[in-house]
Image (cartoon, grey):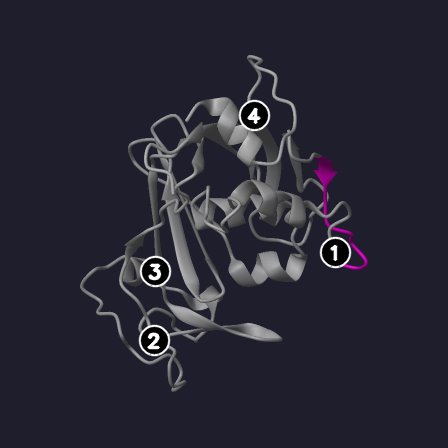
Amino acid sequence: MKRWWVLVLMGLVTVTFTAAADLVIDAHVSLGGTDRSADFVSIIGSLATVDHDHVDAVSGASQHAATPIWIGYGFDVKGARTFPAGLWGLLLFGAASTQTLSLQAPQLVKNTDGSFTIQYEYAGIAYEMTTDLHGALELPTGLYRSRVVGTAQPGKPDLISADFSTNGTAAGLQWSKVWDPGVPSGATIGGLAGSKTGPIRTDAISSRIYSWQGFLQITPVDAGLNFHGEFNAVSSSNPY
């Protein structure tokens, strides 16, 4: 399947080959604190574009509805993921509410070899991604993993297992335990029947139609992160 067929599957009527990337994303995400003035997310692509979406300081809602647009790029026509779940969610933090950003608590770890590790929790799932030595995340390959560590509670903060959190919240997560394969899975979360922790898994792309190929450059600045990514749609070698 040629690349232009991939773009047709994405909903285009007319396809023109150019040297430009099919998808370009820029974002800034604050890490800690309540000053969101620099946070934003911009998405430029053939499906739809949103320019400098950001959170409204009064309502807490995003101003230009980046989420439904980003969904169009993050899933194929069968609902399978074209981005790792953790990376897809990370880029939306630029327009997320301050409460959401605070509860999910994304963290940056600067590794001794010069790479970066980013980790956060959302809806009871912990996500981790590690850049190359130049601060870039590569797609579709790259180091992405996840683990079920808790469960979502409607209208309340996520409940995190005592195996991984000192206080049952994302703020109390002990990340060394989250990524320790020696901590077994299958523990009941907060006494809730049917809610159990899980094993460490690769946070993989699930689409068999297409995926995104390219790099997301991450640059730490002050108390936040700048993102710039350019991606092209690449057809699967094993389509449905």
Give the class, few, some or many, for how many residues have Cα within 10 Å of label 1's Cα (few <14, many ≥20). some
Say which element carries label 4: loop
Can see residue 59?
A: yes
Q: Residue at x 21, y 69 (%)?
A: 184
Rounded to the nearest angstrom, the CA distance separating label 1 from label 3 is 28 Å
Please give the range of residues in magenta: 50-60
- Left or right? Give the position of 45 relative to 134: right
Which quadrant would residue 84 be assigned to in this image?
top left
Please report contact status of discs 1 and 3: CB closer than 8 Å, yes or no. no
Q: For this rendering, which residue is in front, 93 or 34?
A: 93
In the rendered structure, which disc, 4 or 3, sits on the residue that comes first in sequence?
4
Please report contact status of discs 2 and 1: CB closer than 8 Å, yes or no. no
Q: Amino acid at mark 4?
A: Asp
For label 2, the residue is 196
Which quadrant would residue 201 be assigned to in this image?
bottom left
For label 1, the residue is 61
Please report contact status of discs 4 and 3: CB closer than 8 Å, yes or no. no
- Quarter in which the C terminus is drawn: top left
In the rendered structure, which disc, 2 or 4, sits on the residue that comes first in sequence?
4
Query: For the residues carrying marks 2 and 4, which lies nearer the camera in this image?
Result: 4
Secondary structure character of the magenta stretch overall: loop
Rounded to the nearest angstrom, the CA distance separating label 4 from label 3 is 31 Å
Q: For this rendering, which residue is in front, 157 or 38?
A: 157
Q: Amino acid at mark 3?
A: Arg
- Left or right? Give the position of 175 relative to 3: left
Where is residue 120 drawn, in percent x and y? 45, 55
Rounded to the nearest angstrom, the CA distance separating label 2 from label 1 is 32 Å
In the rendered structure, which disc, 2 or 3, sits on the residue that comes first in sequence?
3
